Image (cartoon, rainbow, N blue to C red):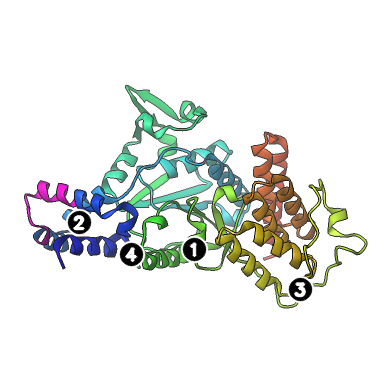
């Protein structure tokens, strides 16, 4: 094994890096910069140094990792998380809301979370944010709380006026926001990282999995599963939900890239009325959307669990139309189920059909008035079309639903 191959393997072991995602050329350039700084001209000798000297290893990691971020990247994600956190904080047993951001980069994401929660009306004692990263340099920048114009790429920069002051060409973050985030150096691939930590209500792990090997993704997913509360929210990058192998289902609209653990039907589900009988879901649905197409052909009966799994498989394979068609066939055979209508809403949302998506979310609520994710999905949809009063109504409904479920155990 030559020196560069040895170093690539060490990076894979340390941080799970799949060299193909950044290119071996980029890795070799980073290695040569560190070799020059260390006064070493032989890659094999540098590889031996990395094994013996953790500071040399950390400096190389700084050169290799992709740490670019900015405030409120994908703004709709933070709006959805704020609604979720406000709902959570209304439950006395869930306050403070615990949030983890991993990785943290230079603090843009955890600070965006903090600003969104404060703007939503939470106080600093109602939430806790832990933020970790393997970059010492990034953590130092986060601690300083000073950012250049490159960290502000949104069209709406009202948050900068509220939470930053100018110092020359730098924007300095308010101390009130900075105090809400606890930064630490840590590695999600360290098996001991999750040991002894209380579960988190919300975990951000955005744009990390796409750089990892398959084995490292499996290990990180296992860590995330241990770190997340049973009914918590996992927020990923846009390309990452299909990467997950476990029992995860969408939470909120497709645009927020959030997941929660799968909740399957009990073996003995109550037999609810068919859609063709009096008092059907279609007749009772508030604010009905455009009529759904009839099932294209008869379906073979499956269990609800099997239907959800197959639709999820089709959607993760990019076959959204087939997934919707499959659900349409099966809903004509199965008893009406909120899980199925919610998944159909998510699929229509991913296809860009907001009317049918909202219709499905309303049907979900007809069958399960305490379906928190459906309330939040409708809140986000209302906010996106500018109906802030309706968005707040749905958010309050989500809070009440969560409170009732909490009270019922």
State the image coordinates of residue 343 (x, y, percent, origin top left).
67, 59
Secondary-structure class at tag 3: loop
Report the Cα–Cα distance between label 4 and label 2: 16 Å
Q: Earlier in the sequence, mark 3 or mark 2?
A: 2
* On screen, residue 14 above or below 58: below
Measure the C-alpha gap from mark 3 to mark 2.
55 Å
Residue count near mark 3 (Cα–Cα under 10 Å), binned few <14, some 14–19, many ≥20: few
Span shown in magenta: 31-44
Q: Which mark is residue 244?
A: 1
- Few, some or many residues within 10 Å of mark 4 (<14, 14–19, 20+): some
In terms of secondary structure, where does tag 4 sit? Answer: loop
- For the image, the number of numbered tags is 4
Quadrant containing the N terminus in the rendered view: bottom left
Query: Would you call the spot at circle 1 few (<14 residues within 10 Å), some (14-19), or many (20 or more)?
Result: some
Q: Main secondary structure of the magenta part?
A: helix
Residue 269: give its label: 3
Residue carrying label 2: 57
- Is 39 a magenta residue? yes
Is residue 248 covered in magenta?
no
Task: Using the numbered discs, state the Cα–Cα distance from disc 1 to disc 3 in whole angstroms.
Answer: 28 Å
The residue at 74%/57% (across/down) is 364
Q: Which mark is residue 190?
A: 4
In the shown orientation, is residue 313 left or right of residue 216? right
Comparing labels 4 and 1, the label whose residue is closer to the camera? 1
């Amino acid at each position: 094994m030559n020196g560069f191959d040895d170093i690539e393997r060490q990076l894979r072991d340390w941080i799970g890096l799949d060299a193909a995602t950044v290119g071996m050329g980029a890795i070799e350039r980073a290695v040569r910069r560190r070799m020059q700084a260390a006064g070493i001209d032989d890659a094999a000798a540098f590889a031996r140094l990395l094994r013996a000297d953790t500071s040399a290893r950390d400096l190389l990691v700084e050169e290799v990792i992709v740490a670019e971020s900015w405030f409120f990247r994908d703004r709709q994600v933070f709006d959805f998380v704020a609604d979720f956190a406000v709902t959570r904080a209304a439950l006395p047993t869930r306050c403070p809301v615990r949030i983890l951001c991993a990785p943290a980069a230079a603090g843009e994401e955890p600070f965006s979370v903090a600003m969104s929660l404060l703007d939503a009306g939470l106080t600093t004692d109602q939430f806790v944010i832990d933020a970790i990263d393997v970059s010492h340099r990034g953590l130092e920048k986060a601690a300083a709380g000073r950012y250049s114009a490159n960290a502000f790429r949104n069209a709406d920069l009202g948050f900068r006026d509220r939470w930053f002051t100018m110092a020359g060409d730098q924007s300095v973050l308010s101390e009130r926001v900075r105090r809400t985030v606890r930064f630490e150096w840590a590695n999600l691939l360290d098996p001991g990282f999750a040991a002894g930590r209380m579960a988190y209500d919300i975990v951000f792990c955005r744009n990390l999995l796409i750089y990892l090997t398959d084995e490292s993704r499996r290990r990180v997913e296992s860590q995330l599963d241990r770190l997340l509360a049973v009914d918590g929210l996992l927020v990923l990058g846009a390309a990452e939900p299909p990467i997950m192998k476990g029992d995860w289902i969408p939470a909120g609209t497709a645009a927020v890239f959030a997941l929660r653990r799968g909740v399957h039907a009990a073996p003995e589900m109550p037999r609810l009325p068919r859609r063709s009988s009096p008092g059907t879901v279609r007749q009772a649905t508030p604010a009905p959307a455009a009529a759904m197409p009839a099932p294209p052909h008869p379906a073979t009966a499956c269990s609800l669990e099997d239907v959800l799994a197959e639709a999820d498989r089709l959607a993760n394979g990019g076959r959204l139309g087939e997934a919707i068609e499959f659900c349409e066939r099966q809903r004509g055979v199965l008893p009406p189920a909120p899980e199925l209508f919610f998944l159909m809403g998510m699929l229509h949302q991913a296809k860009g059909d907001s009317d049918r998506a909202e219709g499905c979310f309303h049907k979900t609520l007809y069958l399960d008035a305490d379906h928190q994710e459906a309330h939040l999905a409708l809140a986000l949809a209302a906010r996106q079309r500018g109906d802030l009063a309706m968005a707040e109504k749905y958010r309050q409904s989500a809070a009440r639903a969560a409170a009732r479920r909490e009270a019922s155990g």
